[in-house]
Image (tube, rainbow, N blue to C red):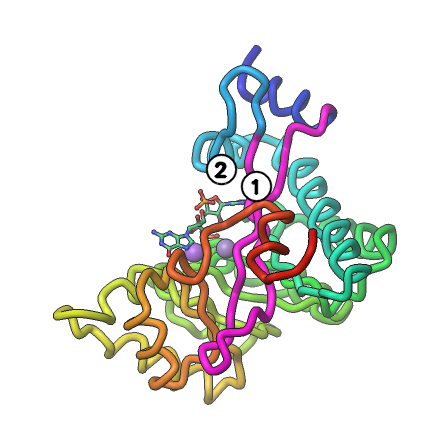
Amino acid sequence: LSLIGELRRAIDEDELVLHYQPKVSTKTWRVVGVEALIRWEHPVRGLLQPGEFIPQAEENEIIVPLTDRVLTMALHQHRIWRAQDTPLPVAVNVPTVCLLDETFPDRVAKALAASGVAPGALTLEITETSIINDPVRASKILTELRAMGVRLSVDDFGTGYSSMSYLQSMPLNELKIDRSFIRTLSGSHGGTAIVRAVLELARALDLDVVAEGVEDEETLILLGHMGCTYAQGYYISRPVRASDLMAWLGRPA
Ligand code: G
Ligand code: G
Ligand code: MN
Ligand code: NA
């Protein structure tokens, strides 16, 4: 069976699972939300990471039902957390194909309605490159999503080699500074210029900023001092299954 054929089966037979990586406040170190990251519990090959199947899925129409599945699972998990008095906002990664698909806002609306989750509890992470691919179409779809009350975040910010003019015209809420700029903050690297510039830009445009890829305490503290409000990364927590997240938060699963 081809990978795509197998993925079709995986969707039908519930082999796809989500892990969750917390996003924390750099001031209080409290969790403010989680990013859902897909894994595949393959019956023969074991637990597969997204890098092993997402790139191929994105070349095929299977990415559409796969993304719908991820949305449904993430919203369902939010409902469970909410019932446990832990209503963590969830972020889902949106592939380019979906961002440029006119039926996407409607599919998101249906997933929200079916789960009974408030739109504001959902963040969609969109890569900068997929916005730049087709800014006119992206803008139309992002405007519809924003009008529904969903939050919009630009993932991997700073890697798209873009003019950044889209930042003014699109209804965004958040920038996630790519980890390549965060990695050089601590130790002897001393590369703070880009991060400072992004923070300044975000302040002017009234956007939240999340630093990705925080791998040590020094970086987390430095980000707080620089005025970066939110952070995510292995130092805080790796992506973990939902039950482990509750344990990490010190709550019964
Ligand atoms: O979890 P990991 O670091 O291996 O993720 C690798 C890449 O796969 C990241 O770029 C991430 O955005 C992407 N990815 C993870 N989960 C999903 C998902 O549910 N949908 C899509 N489209 N991409 C995902
Ligand atoms: O493209 P996206 O930002 O969605 O990628 C998320 C991926 O980044 C996940 O696969 C996750 O495992 C990985 N990731 C998260 N935190 C860190 C980190 O601190 N260091 C590194 N190297 N990767 C990270
Ligand atoms: Mn992401
Ligand atoms: Na990223």
Whole-percent x and y of residue 132?
46, 59
**Taking the image as drawn, is residue 94 in sight?**
no
Residue 112 vs residue 214, the one in the foreground: 214
Q: Is mark 2 within 8 Å of ligand 1?
A: yes
Residue marked by disc 2: 50
Residue plotted at (75% across, 70% down): 149
Looking at the rendered structure, the kind of residue marked 1 is Ile
Residue 11 vs residue 40, the one in the foreground: 40
Whole-percent x and y of residue 165?
45, 74
Residue marked by disc 1: 38
Q: Does the magenta-highlighted stretch encompass residue 30?
A: yes
Whole-percent x and y of residue 219?
30, 71
Tell which residue pokes out farthest to the top in this image: 1
Looking at the rendered structure, the kind of residue marked 2 is Pro
Where are the magenta residues, as a range? 13-40
Whole-percent x and y of residue 62?
63, 31
Residue 207 vs residue 248, the one in the foreground: 248
Main SS class of the magenta portion in the image = strand
Relative to 200, is 74 on the left or the right?
right
Numbered tag placed on residue 169 in the rendering: none
Residue plotted at (67% across, 64% down): 88
Name the quarter where the N terminus is drawn.
top right
Residue plotted at (42% across, 80% down): 228
33 up-or-down from 58: above or below: below
SS assignment at label 2: helix
62 up-or-down from 190: above or below: above
Pointer 2 with pointer 1, Cβ within 8 A: yes
Distance from Cα at disc 2 to Cα at disc 1: 6 Å
Number of other residues with Cα within 10 Å of mark 1, as a class: few under 14, some 14 to 19, many 20 or more:
many
